[in-house]
Amino acid sequence: MGERSGYFCAENFLHFLPQKIFKQMKKIETQPQDYLPANLRYLRKQFGLSQEVFAEKIGLNRGNIASYENGSCQPKICNLKNFSKFFQVSIGDLTSSDLRKLGAYENAINNFNKKSVWEIEVIDTYLTKAQETERLLESLQTTFAITASKINELPSDIQFLLLNYQQMYKASKKIVATHKDLLEYLKQKSIEKGY
């Protein structure tokens, strides 16, 4: 059986199976397990909710929940996000992990919360860098103001550069302000959503 004498090689053994069974086994090997139906049912019951009550809380109808739980229908991404937020687990854990296993749901909640803290820390780091950039621009502007006060004494090509610098400074200030606003918005959304 194979090139290695004295060793059992499972790969070669599989080729002796009928082709139909071999193909099915290979298919099972490569398909990721979809735990969403079982996880939704399990978590809903853990929360003590009927399909109808759970559907109301999520903004769906009972039939949607029943379809998702029996696997006959896949939810839209917006509904997955709602499930994720409601159960405080990532979409990845909700769809790809068996949350019915002992401690799995608790681990998924911990990972979800760690992600929230980590994202806020990353946003805070970028906010700090934006504030440093803003201070640097202010420092450059102060230096420019000193040089610009003697603009008439400078050669014409330097005068031209100084005028262009002023436009570049204004554009840079707008970019940094927009960047900070965006980061503040993302931070607020992360805090509100729990991610």
Image (cartoon, rainbow, N blue to C red):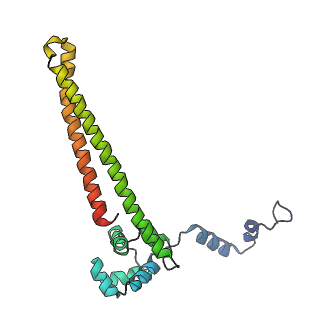
Q: What residue sits 42% from the left and 71% below the top?
A: 109
* In the foreground, 99 or 95: 99
Residue 79 pos. (x, y %): 33, 72
| The quadrant where residue 148 appears | top left
| The quadrant where residue 47 appears | bottom left
* Residue 103 seen in the figure: yes
Tally of numbered tags: 0
Say whether residue 15 is left or right of residue 156. right
Residue 130 pos. (x, y %): 29, 43
Q: Quadrant of the C terminus?
A: bottom left
Where 117 sits versus 33, above or below? above
Where 30 sits versus 118, above or below? below
Residue 100 pos. (x, y %): 49, 80
* In the foreground, 134 or 41: 134
Q: What residue sits 22% from the left and 25% below the top?
A: 143
Say whether residue 175 is left or right of residue 108. left
* Residue 163 seen in the figure: no
Q: Quadrant of the N terminus?
A: bottom right
Q: What residue sits 41% from the left and 66% below the top?
A: 112
Where 164 sits versus 131, above or below? above
Say whether residue 139 is left or right of residue 74. left
Residue 116 pos. (x, y %): 37, 62
Say whether residue 124 is left or right of residue 100. left
Q: What residue sits 33% from the left and 52% below the top?
A: 123
